[in-house]
């Protein structure tokens, strides 16, 4: 990782010079790439329509624009109050991902992050290296049933993040993803932090559990039951005792 910073007309870009040799505002525009394809998926796994797959030659990336959720998005969909460069959404997530990668955790490689400031507000984007063959847990469970080993390994994987003090602000069936070998990857660390052990870990698990239940309500044919959740918890707590 060679963290570099490029000043722009209305903001700045933080990037890894080992991944992208040059950056500009054009880097965050679809037209600068050979191909730019919207991410699709089941159960909102494409996010809020703010994510693109990018490619240039053999290199593939993911561009995500930061957008608000909930009722506030109707008023200020992609604008945030300016609290300083280091607190900007993209810069904070870029640096958190770099730390997690350095610890060997399965997260995307951060390539570049940008903010554009206008008065007391700013907008932000982040580009990460695309992980080959991954898909959201919601997509995975829609296709086929997962065995006990899958759920136990998934629980152990989440425990690994928690043991490292990684707080994921939106742990759900879209941001929990698996590759072709069913290995866990976590995406979208907006508002993520490193924290000491505490009640947040149990709340994180509860949030993920609600997401699985909601997926089941959304699609009754999905391959998930409470027995699977029990196996997930077994994997989590077995890994916790060994940590």
Image (cartoon, rainbow, N blue to C red):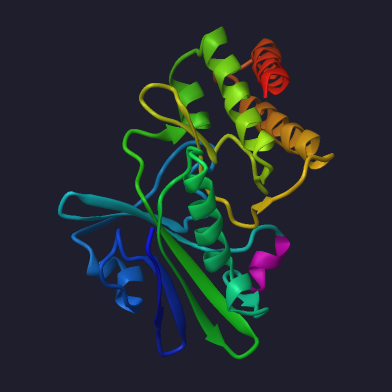
Q: Which picture quadrant has residue 151?
A: top right
Q: Nearer the viewer, residue 182 or 240?
A: 240
Q: Position of residue 207 (x, y in %)?
A: 73, 37
Q: Image height check: is 209 above or below 28?
A: above
Image quarter in which the N terminus is found: bottom left
The picture quadrant where one finds residue 167 is top right
Query: Which residue is farthest right?
Result: 199
Residue 8 image offset from top left, x and y in percent: 40, 85
Residue located 52% across and 42% down the image: 103
Main secondary structure of the magenta stretch: helix
Image label count: 0
Quadrant position of residue 43: top right
| Residue plotted at (71% across, 13% down) | 230
**Residue that appears at 24% across and 69% down:** 32
Magenta stretch bounds: 71-76
Image position of 56 (left or right of 93): left
Q: Which residue is at 53% across, 43% downward?
A: 44
Relative vertical location of residue 133 with respect to residue 72 in this rendering, above or below: above
Instruction: Evaluate whether residue 218 shows in this view.
Output: no
Q: Name the quadrant of the C terminus.
A: top right
Where residue 191 appears, as percent x and y from the top left, is 65, 57
Whether residue 21 sits left or right of residue 123 in the image: it is: left
Residue 72 on the magenta segment:
yes
Q: Position of residue 49 (x, y in %)?
A: 47, 55
Q: Is residue 128 visible?
A: yes
Magenta residue check for 46 = no
């Amino acid at each position: 990782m060679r963290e570099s910073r490029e000043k722009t007309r209305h903001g700045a870009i933080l990037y890894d010079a080992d991944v992208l040799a040059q950056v500009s505002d054009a880097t965050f525009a679809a037209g600068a790439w050979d191909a730019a394809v919207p991410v699709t998926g089941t159960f909102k796994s494409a996010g809020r329509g703010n994510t693109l797959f990018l490619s240039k030659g053999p290199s593939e990336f993911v561009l995500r624009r930061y957008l608000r959720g909930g009722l506030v998005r109707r008023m200020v969909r992609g604008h945030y109050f300016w609290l300083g460069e280091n607190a900007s959404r993209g810069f904070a997530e870029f640096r958190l991902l770099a730390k997690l990668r350095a610890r060997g955790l399965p997260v995307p490689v951060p390539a570049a992050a940008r903010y554009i400031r206008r008065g007391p507000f700013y907008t932000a984007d982040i580009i990460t290296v695309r992980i080959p063959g991954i898909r959201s847990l919601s997509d995975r469970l829609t296709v086929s049933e997962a065995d006990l080993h899958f759920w136990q390994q998934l629980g152990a994987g989440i425990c690994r993040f928690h043991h490292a003090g990684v707080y994921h602000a939106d742990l759900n069936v879209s941001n929990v993803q698996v590759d072709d070998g069913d290995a866990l990857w976590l995406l979208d660390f907006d508002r993520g932090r490193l924290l000491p052990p505490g009640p947040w870990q149990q709340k994180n698990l509860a949030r993920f559990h609600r997401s699985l239940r909601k997926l089941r309500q959304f699609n009754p044919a999905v391959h998930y039951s409470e027995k699977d959740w029990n196996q997930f918890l077994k994997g989590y707590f077995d890994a916790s005792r060994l940590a």
